[in-house]
Amino acid sequence: HGSRPGPTRAPTTAMPDTRVPVTVLTGYLGSGKTTLLNHILTANHGKRIAVIENEFGDVGVDDALVQQRYETSEDIFEMNNGCICCTVRGDLIRILSKLFKRRDRLDAVVIETTGLADPGPVAQTFFMDESIKEHARLDAIVTLVDAKHIEQHLDEEKPEGAENEAVEQVAFADRILLNKTDLVSEEDLLRVEKRLKSINSQAPVQRCTKAEVSPDWVLDIGAFDLKRVIEMDPEFLNTDGEHEHDTSVSSVAITENVPLD
């Protein structure tokens, strides 16, 4: 008698993740985040993208730049509470919940943080809040770096206890866009790349000018790795941690209703 074959098991296939991918766009002041955002919004990719802007101050500047170029007021949300890392969770959760309630098909959400934000607390939101976890997944933290000025930002002495945001932005990055490469020499670029790799050896670095890069390099890339982040920052999922600011930075808003030269 031949032995009977055992029952054949159906291959287990993982359910596709249908949650909306969220890209966090970070980078120091003047690194080119809004320019990149404009490229993404005007590129011919057919994706429906919601944008969440965060400003450090009372008057939104970046969102006006984006709306002007994109000729839309639709799906551009603004948070003018200054620090995206402190008051962000409530605001971000409120805006995302509003987006998901509309049930419109969304292909991606892009959050542009203020240049003074540590991306860590923004990323935490996607693991802390159950309602957000259900609808959205953190897809990638993309950091823009100004090739000409990044070294001075990384070297900046901060008050005791305050984090250097430029360092945090590079350390948390899943992908790094080394922008404004036309303003420095090849020798400078190699030195800057080596410095970036010393802070974050995992993230691929892409050189660019005027923040021109394919949206495919930034959107829906599945690059965020929670395990890597926890290795780097074991307290990542502990939201009660201390969070200090550089009090030497503040903002003043002047609103004019005539064009300025």
Image: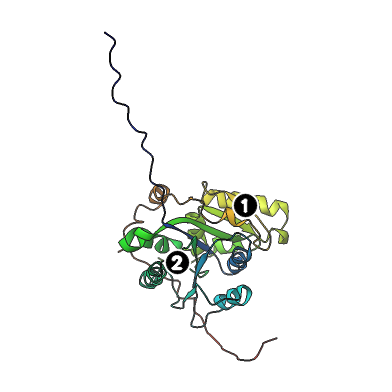
Cα–Cα span, label 1 and label 2: 33 Å
N-term mark: 1 or 2? 2
Marks 1, 2: nearer the viewer: 2
At which x and y percent is residue 180?
A: 67, 61
Pick the quarter of the image with the N terminus.
top left
- Give the secondary structure at mark 2: loop
Does 5 sit above or below residue 128?
above
**Closest to the observer, 175 or 199:** 175
> Amino acid under label 2?
Asp
**Closest to the observer, 172 or 156:** 172
Q: Quadrant of residue 133?
A: bottom left
Give the residue number, with chain letter if any, for mark 1. Answer: 206
Residue at the image point whose x is 40% and y is 68% from the top = 96
**Closest to the observer, 205 or 98:** 98
> Amino acid under label 1?
Gln
The numbered disc on residue 104 is 2
Pick the quarter of the image with the C terminus.
bottom right
Residue at the far front in the pictured view: 1
What is the crowding at mark 2: few (fewer than 14 residues within 10 Å), some, or many (at least 20)? few
At which x and y percent is residue 186?
A: 72, 52
